[in-house]
Image (spheres, rainbow, N blue to C red):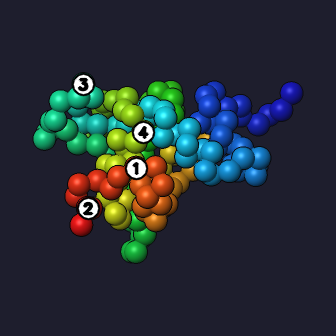
Amino acid sequence: MSDRPQPTNEIDYLIDGVRRELCSLGTLYEVLLRSEVWVMCNKPWDGKTKDPELQTLIVKSSEEGMPDFLPAFSAEAHAVAAQAKYPAYPTLNKMAAPMVVMHCGSTTGLALNPGTDFSIQVQPKGIDQLRKVFGPKPASDAA
């Protein structure tokens, strides 16, 4: 039996596969964009109603020239482990991954499962590519 942590869901399996060069990033992205993920917010959200007071955690980079990241988690347990670091965002909301991707601005990347054994970062350029291939640009970035 391996001491290596075992994936617990399809996204974890694919991240593990990408790291071990057993599957492509494209496959991971296709599955991700059909999935739901957990994000840390300042309050509960029903997933439908527009709420101008709702804030989603964006982790600001401490390094000059490095992008900010929106952390998203493929499993609630992954998110719970990260919550202690961000007390201003005590609520976990489950959201459609495409909505989360569209929430990333042109200078914000996506950190999937940060702090876990099954983490991967999608840089802002990768988010732009996801939008080109899999969906429309967010209204704030549309020209």
The answer to whether residue 110 shows anywhere in this view is no
Task: Give how far apart the Cα atoms at labels 2 and 1 are.
Answer: 12 Å
- Find residue 46 and name its label: 3
- For marks 4 and 1, the one nearer the N-term is 4
Mark 1: few/some/many CA within 10 Å (<14, 14-19, 20+): some
* Three-letter residue code for mark 3: Asp
Contact, CB < 8 Å: mark 1 with mark 3? no
Total labels: the figure holds: 4
Instruction: Name which residue lies at 23% across and 29% down.
Output: 48
Q: CA distance from mark 1 to mark 3?
A: 23 Å
Residue at 49% from the left image edge and 35% from the top image edge: 34
Q: Which residue bears the numbered disc 4?
A: 97
Of 102 and 15, nearer the camera is: 102
Give the x, y percent position of residue 82. Answer: 45, 38
The answer to which quarter of the image holds residue 68 is bottom left
Q: Local crowd at mark 3 within 10 Å, few (<14), some, or many (≥20)?
A: few
Query: In this figure, which residue is indicated by the disc labeled 2?
Result: 142
Q: Which of the two discs, 3 and 4, labels the residue nearer the N terminus? A: 3
Q: Earlier in the sequence, mark 2 or mark 3?
A: 3
Mark linked to residue 54: none
Which residue does the numbered mark 1 point to in the structure image? Answer: 135
Q: Nearer the viewer, mark 4 or mark 2?
A: 2
Q: Are marks 2 and 1 in contact (CB under 8 Å)?
A: no
Q: CA distance from mark 3 to mark 4?
A: 15 Å
